[in-house]
Amino acid sequence: MISLNWIKDYVNIDGIDPKELASKITKAGINVEHVISQKIDNLVVGEITKCTSHPDSDHLHICEVNIGDKIVQIICGASNVREGLKVITALPGAILPGNFEIKVSKIRGVESNGMLCALFELGLEEKTEETYNKGITELPNDAVVGTDPLAYLGLDDTLYELDLNPNRFDCNNHLSFAYEIGAILDRHVTMPCTKTNPIPETNDVTIDIATENCYMYNAKVVKDVTIKESPDFIKQRLINAGMRPINNVVDISNYVMLEYGQPLHFFDKAKLGSHIKVRMANDNEEIITLDNQKRILNKDDIVITDGDKPVCIAGVMGGFNTEVDENTKDIVIESAIFNPYNVRYTSLNLNLRSEASLRYEKGLNYEYCNLAIERACHLLEKYADGKVLTGTTTYDNIDKKEKIITVTKKQINSLLGMHLTNEEIEEQLRKLSFPYQKEKDTYHVSVPPRRLDIGNYPADIIEEVGRLYGYDTIKAQLPILPTKTGVYAPKTKFRKDISKHMRSLGLNEVRTYTLISEEENKEFNRNPDNSIHLLRPLIKERSVIRTTIISSLLKSINYNIGRKNKDIMLYEIANVYDKDYYEETKLAFALHGNYLHSTWQNNNNEIDYYLTKGIVENLLDYLGLTNRYTFRLSDNLPKEIHPKVNSEIIIDNEVVGYIGKVHPMTSKYNIYVGEISLDKLYAKKVRSIKFKELNKYPVITKDLAFIINSKVTSDEITKVIKKAGGRLLTNIEVFDVYHGDKLETNQKSIAFHLTFEDNTKTLTDDEINILFNKIITDVTNKCHAILRDN
Amino acid sequence: MDQLKKEIQAKLTSAKTLEELNNLKVEYLGKKGIITELNSKIKEIPNEEKKTYGMKVNELRTLFNDLYNQSKENIELEEVNRRLESEAIDVTLPATKIEVGAPHSLEKLIEELEELLMSMGYDVVEGPEVEKDLYNFELLNLPKGHPARDAQDTFYIQDDEILLRSQTSPVQVRTMLENTDKTPIRIICPGKTYRRDEDDATHSHQFTQMEGLLVDENVSLANLKATFDVIAKKLFGETRQTRFRPSFYPFTEPSVELDISCFNCEGKGCPICKNTGWITVGGAGMVHPKVLDNCGYDPEKFTGFAFGFGIERLAMLKYGVKDIRTFYTPNDLRVLEQFKRKDSE
């Protein structure tokens, strides 16, 4: 949260509309998400010139209030209302928090033309019993009647709530933000005052840095501080930034952090002593932090110690043992830079994320590290009566080599696709306060240390120039490239074709979640141990990467049945992964209801096993796999599948998937499901289409039927027929299956329609009869069948 | 004979059925038919009258045949009409409908984008969802511990190594690495992505991205702008304007947010654009030189742009879907079926 009143300390923004400024800043890449104005219209300083009791009330008063150009009558119920008081007066038209509009009204019969206010009623103070009991806010006598009371109190601020990109987290701090405004408005930035008047006594703190993860460490001593309430402007600014004021000393450390982005830590010198050692913690080392919690550390945490025991977890939280309290007199100020990764690790590990740790994590700028400690001394001198000791104890292992990036005008214009002149480029660099050396069209730009986000590439400078100049001047220009048509990766194309085919078959595509629960992982899955489990799932319902899609589809089917939706045909194509990270693309489908329906004609076609099989065969035929697939009853399928109404789909002796009815214990509804490996289908080579001349000789058809044991499958008989029929038998079709009264209970009758043809000549009756008789003999012998006489 | 003529005319025109007609044929033209008999009597006619007699009999025969054919035609027509009448149905009764399945709304939108971008020469490439940290982060200029990784809290499968990809950018990395000839690249990569977000109306732990990558010599931000213009107009209408807003992505420099002028209020301000007149639909930028370098492309020679869209976000905007979970659960048929039709062009 940025306070514009605070920003005014560093850069002149007078006369600029805060909303307009916000949109300029947003356009330059720092997102101002909300502009919050504390200004309230129709609010004036009034003076109560007469105060009498309301005739109809024991606590209301009728006040005559001078608001400058006139005197108005206002009814007030506050206990402290009295003649001569200067007060905040809300006149008709004022809109107070909660969208409460002040209007002319009658209170118990007496006209009231406004309201005398307390700060909490204006949303500028918390409403507590204490503030409530204080009554209306009493303004000092120097407040001028008729003027804006919030401006008088310095409470007419405008706040910017920012949504920062991770590279510009520094803009959370008022100085960095002021530099952005300075660049946008082309205005100079004035740094805060860091002057102190040190006393002759010398800072006696010694430091020992025993870890390379501490890059910089400054310590200063301020003596004899008075702990008290902060001045109003500090309190108000902290509140606006979302921090609670505590006392002047603590508030100053937060204030400086919000100014520079450099977190400071204050130790009570009496408790700390005069020696500081920074080192890595030992495993299981303990510290009680400011919040009175015991924390267990490990060797990746950086700690500040008094030479022996930890007194602070570096960058995260101070120790209880050296805390500044109301009795503190002398303080040691720490301003340091630590390895951001360690701070990040520690704060995540201890689940202790603070305003300070967030700043350490993003990396800090050594210039501000040095300035912030001086600034804190200045403020402690001014607002806590502190005496600053001479000298700073410093450890400094920062590489301060100037970062210089060379970039040419040509590079700038060709990457941006713009046509900037040298003057325009130079203007942007100047506004950014980036010093540069120029050689013709080449710029050697020096990156200020405050801009940690800028890398080592010309593109880093080009982006700064471009964003400040404004991308809206870019003229769109399609790339000039060789013309070609894009293509799908072959496997993607295959999947898309199948997906379209499933839709043309009337199935609706769905997408369900890849992540499922442990329980769901056990459904329709013969091998639940083969699944990937997430290391840190967010919720247990989404903790396993699925290896089958069917359970998710079944959930959708059940939902739809529950909603009384009819004829639910669903499919999904998704990648699944096993615990060896092997990826497989699967097609799954789940079907329920009528495939075709026409209720009034009574010829509904309810989904059953054979229709499901037909859908799969349709797909396989489309893929050119006709005559290469078979369906075989399996006892290898998940327990949720009907053991007698299912089949594995086999192509060229390889199982590529299965179909089946959902087990009655799993669902009481007739639901058919299937799952096929698209990778396995994709691997099947098919020949390209070659036209075959039609047979010009006559076709001969014959029918025959067998009575046979029910357990013998149609496939078994067909195989025998096919073998016996040989090359001339070109088609076998089952046209009737009969179980019933005329047969034994374990028998069925099955009838075939056979087609014979020869594309080289006309077949004779003799030729056909030989084949036909061989078929009868073979089926009767091999399948123990009886030829059925018509 | 004249008498006979009248009789034939009367009988044939009054016949009602084919059977009656056939009977008449037998009666007149059959072996012992009246006309046949008349014909055979010709031998008894004196020679000088034979010719006239013959002509008259023939006239009768022709008359009979003509009337017969005409009558037959009429009767047949009547019979067909009767049959048609008897076959009348109520054509307003419900159809036996052949249902066509619907593509998933996200797939529909992806295919629309694919079609557009393929026509501009972009190939469609996909990659694994279970991905290496190396491709998802490291080579994309997001080293371990990088604060920008925070914005993408990731589902890890194996610490620091294997994860569920949090973006489709690893497909770009893989494509650049696999292209060992280091020739120019023009691809789009749609796919599923995952982040450790709690599901609510606007967040989903599983979502879909489509990224595009173009690497060549002399590619500029102006090229990206024109490409984005084409996409924005295709998806949201010809009157769309586009805007770049500076942004940050670790793998692009400069980075921009892709905004379109609000299609709902045409920029006047409404709840959809939060009264700004602009809607952010994606992110983009010039491929970071470090990323080009990591993937074996010389950043001195090559530049490129990359862009990315959240497909759910686009679909929510385009179709007016309010809750992102609608795309994944519970898959109500009444939702799915709304996308089965061809969209307006």
Image (cartoon, helix red, strand yellow):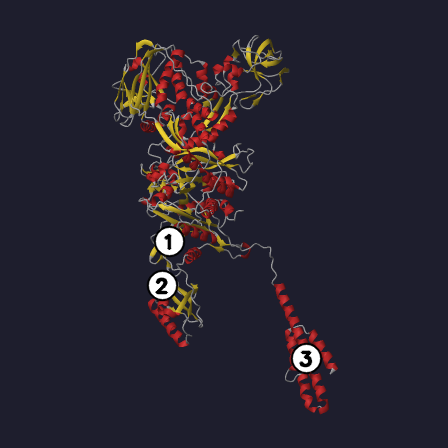
Q: Quadrant of residue A649?
A: bottom left
Residue at 66% x, 81% y is: B27
Whether residue A151 is visible, yes or no, is yes
- Residue bearing mark 3: B62
From this view, report whether residue A225 is shown above or below residue A172: above
Task: Label 3, secondary structure: give it.
Answer: helix
- Residue bearing mark 1: A682
In-front residue for pair A32/A517? A32
The reply, left or right, for residue A160 in relation to residue B11 is: left
Chain letter, disc 2 residue: A
* Disc 1 from disc 2: Cα separation: 29 Å
- For discs 1 and 2, the disc positioned in front in the rendered view: 1
Chain letter, disc 3 residue: B
Q: Please determine if labels 1 and 2 lie on a single subunit.
A: yes
Quarter holding the N terminus of chain B is: bottom right
Q: Residue furthest front?
A: A440
Q: Amino acid at mark 2?
A: Glu
In-front residue for pair A248/A437? A437
Coordinates of residue A297 in the picture (x, y in percent)? 28, 26
* Crowd band around label 2 with a 10 angstrom C-alpha radius: few (<14), some (14–19), many (20+): few
> Which label number is shown at residue A716?
2
Q: Amino acid at mark 1?
A: Tyr
Q: Quadrant of residue B53?
A: bottom right
Coordinates of residue A596 in the picture (x, y in percent)? 50, 55
Chain letter, disc 1 residue: A
* Disc 2 from disc 3: Cα separation: 69 Å
The reply, left or right, for residue A199 in relation to residue A790 is: left
